[in-house]
Image (cartoon, rainbow, N blue to C red):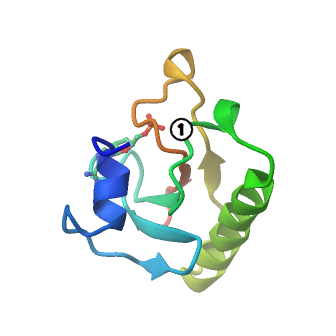
Amino acid sequence: MNDCVFCKIITSEIPCKFLHEDDKCVVFKDIHPKDNTHLLIVPKKHIHSISEMEDGDEKIAGHLLHVAKKLGQDLGLSGYKLQINVGKDGGQEIFHLHVHLLSKLG
Ligand code: AMP
């Protein structure tokens, strides 16, 4: 977990501007944006992947979607995609759960 890039961002070991922060998650821009808007919604708890969620983590996962909805509203996005890559074969590169919010708008 100590080598986790996203944990280091959350603890400010790696500087990063948060677009949103609450008790459960942070939101920041993807360093290699794949669309005009490309945000990452990241839980503060280190959850390796959707496939390794523990009992109770569903509340955190639901919260990430709730924050995505609020971001979409706040940014005035009429449409966007949410993406979660699961496992190496699912395209996951950073093994700390995160939701991509992608939009051609913004
Ligand atoms: P995934 O393939 O779902 O694991 O996506 C990981 C994402 O994290 C990629 O889109 C990367 O561009 C992004 N990423 C990696 N390191 C950083 C970083 N230091 N700050 C922001 N985004 C990052």
Residue at (40% x, 30% y) in the render: 93
Residue closer to the observer: 12 or 42: 12
Residue 19 image offset from top left, x and y in percent: 41, 78
Quadrant housing residue 83 = top right
Left or right of 79, for residue 20: left
Residue reaching furthest to the bottom: 74
The residue under label 1 is: 48
Question: What is the three-letter code of the residue carrying label 1?
Answer: His
Q: Position of residue 62 (x, y in %)?
A: 77, 61
Instruction: Report helix, strand or loop for mark 1.
Output: loop
Give percent across and percent down for residue 14: 19, 61
Local crowd size for mark 1, using a 10 Å CA cut-off: few (<14), some (14–19), many (≥20):
some
Ligand 1 within 8 angstroms of badge 1 C-beta: no
The residue shown at (31%, 67%) is: 11
Q: Toward the viewer: 70 or 103?
A: 70
- Front residue of 92/72: it is 92
Report whether 61 appears left or right of 42. Answer: right
In the depicted structure, whether residue 57 falls above or below residue 69: above
Tell which quarter ligand 1 is in: top left
* Quadrant of the image containing the N terminus: top left
Q: Position of residue 42 (x, y in %)?
A: 51, 58
The image shows a total of numbered marks equal to 1
Q: Residue at x 42, y 51 (%)?
A: 35
Quadrant (top left/top right/bottom left/bottom right) for the C terminus:
bottom left
Q: Quadrant for residue 54, please give it.
A: top right
For residue 78, which quarter of the picture?
bottom right
In the displayed structure, does residue 60 sit left or right of residue 59?
left
Left or right: where does residue 23 sit relative to residue 13? right
